Structures are given as structure tokens and as C-alpha cells.
Amino acid sequence: MCNLYSQKNSLQEIRDWFDVKAIDPSAGNLPEQKAIFPAYNAPVVYLESNDRKITMMKWGFVLQQSGKAIKHVNNCRDDKVMTSQFWKSSFFNRRCLVPASKFSEYHPNIRNEKDHKASVWFELNEEPVFAFAGIWTKFAGHYKGEFGSFETYSIITTTPNELVKPIHQSRMPVIIEHADYGSWLSGSLERAGGLMKKYPANQMKIANIGLNTDD
């Protein structure tokens, strides 16, 4: 499960790391984002005409519920992405990479100085930027009182590794190895499916425990 992450790398760093060929104007100068929550706009790398492009998308597929507020479904389970009608078209046709610096889960026991659940921030040992496995789609419809049309993305989750499990027992985001970016974006369904696995715990660490910002 992932409901909070950060992305603090520059546009040029993202462009170089992900071998991006085109930049959508929405990305602008790609400002630092210390805390990205569901329904926030954040950078996403996807394929357009077989070239990697970076753009801003809203985090969480839009789920319209009769008589209820719109919900942003920000996570997708790896064991449902190929079978659920809500997800599978995007997995088959619209996979993406979600740049990140760190991700966070609430600590089950520790509280911060504001007496809220403390956020545990995870990062990779060696890489200052990494990529979540993502899928994306386009939403068009009534959104917050008016008609809207925009792209949304969701992050795929899997079972947690030994580092994350004591903090969140059921899920962690799928992290794609740098060498596998091409396979995730355009590889076969079988190949992409094989990449949905827990990231090695010995290649990650807890960066800090505290507030809901990556400071």
C-alpha cells in the first residue's frame, strides 16, 4: 500500500535517468514535491509513439460512486491487475513509470510530535531516484461539480519485503529495476507480469520517521 511519496529530483535528472525524449508542457520545471498524496498531480513517464515522454497526471484512477463522493483509487494489487475490469485494460495497454525519491507508510505504534501516526520514509540504498510500476488511463466526466478531462495513474502494489513488513504487513509498492524500464513499458504481458515482485530488502533502508513530509 502506498498513500504518500515524494519526488525531489530535477527535470533534467528525471530526463536523464528515464531516457525521456519528450516533455509535456504540464511538467514545467518539475518543482520539488516533498509530499505527494492521492489526487495530487505528479510526474509520470509513459510511451507516446514509442518514445518516452514525461507529463503530469493525477494520482488515483477516478471511481464515481452513486450518491457518494468521487474516490481516487491510487493503488492496484498485483494479483488483480490482469483480471479486474477496472485495471486490466490499462495494464495491457498503458503501463507507466512513476518517478519517486522516497515512499511512506504510517508506523503502527510510534506517534510524532503532533501526536499523529508517524510516517516511516523508505528509500533505496544507492539510487536517489527510482520508479514505481504504474498504469494510467484518461478520465472524462463530471469531477467536483464540473466536466473534466485529464489523465490519471495508479501504483501497483505487492507483498511487502522484510524491511517494510513490520511497518505495513500486507502491501508495498512495486519498484521497477532501472534495467527493466523498457520491459515494463513495452514488454510482453508475461514479462511485465514477472516484474511485479517485492524489491529486495537489503537494497532499501528507512530514511527517517516523523511527519508527513520528506524533509
Image (tube, rainbow, N blue to C red):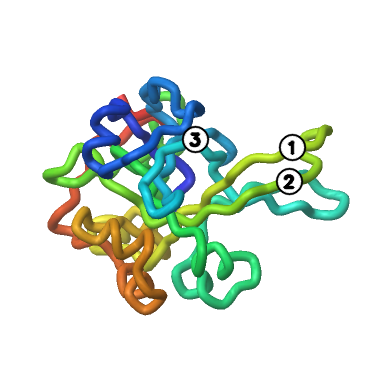
User: Residue 140 got which mark?
Assistant: 2
> What is the quadrant of the C terminus in the image?
top left
| Residue in front for this viewpoint, 79 or 25 | 25
Checking the image for residue 148, the label placed there is: 1
Query: SS at mark 3?
Result: strand
Q: Circles 1 and 2: CB distance less than 8 Å?
A: yes
CA separation, marks 1 and 2? 6 Å
How many neighbours does mark 3 have within 10 angstroms: few (below 14), some (14-19), or many (20 or more)? many
Q: Which mark is residue 56?
A: 3
Q: Earlier in the sequence, mark 3 or mark 2?
A: 3
Residue 109 visible at all: no
For marks 1 and 2, the one nearer the N-term is: 2
CB contact under 8 Å: marks 3 and 2: no
Task: Give the image location of residue 123, x and y in percent.
Answer: 24, 43
- Circle 2 packing at 10 Å, graded few (<14), some (14-19), many (20+), is few
Q: Give the x, y percent position of residue 111.
A: 40, 36
In the shown orientation, is residue 31 left or right of residue 150? left
Q: Residues within 10 Å of mark 1 (few under 14, many from 20)?
A: few
**Could you tell me the amino acid type at mark 3?**
Met
| Residue at position x 48%, y 26% in the image | 25
What is the count of numbered marks? 3
Amino acid type indicated by mark 2: Ala
On-image quarter of the N terminus: bottom left
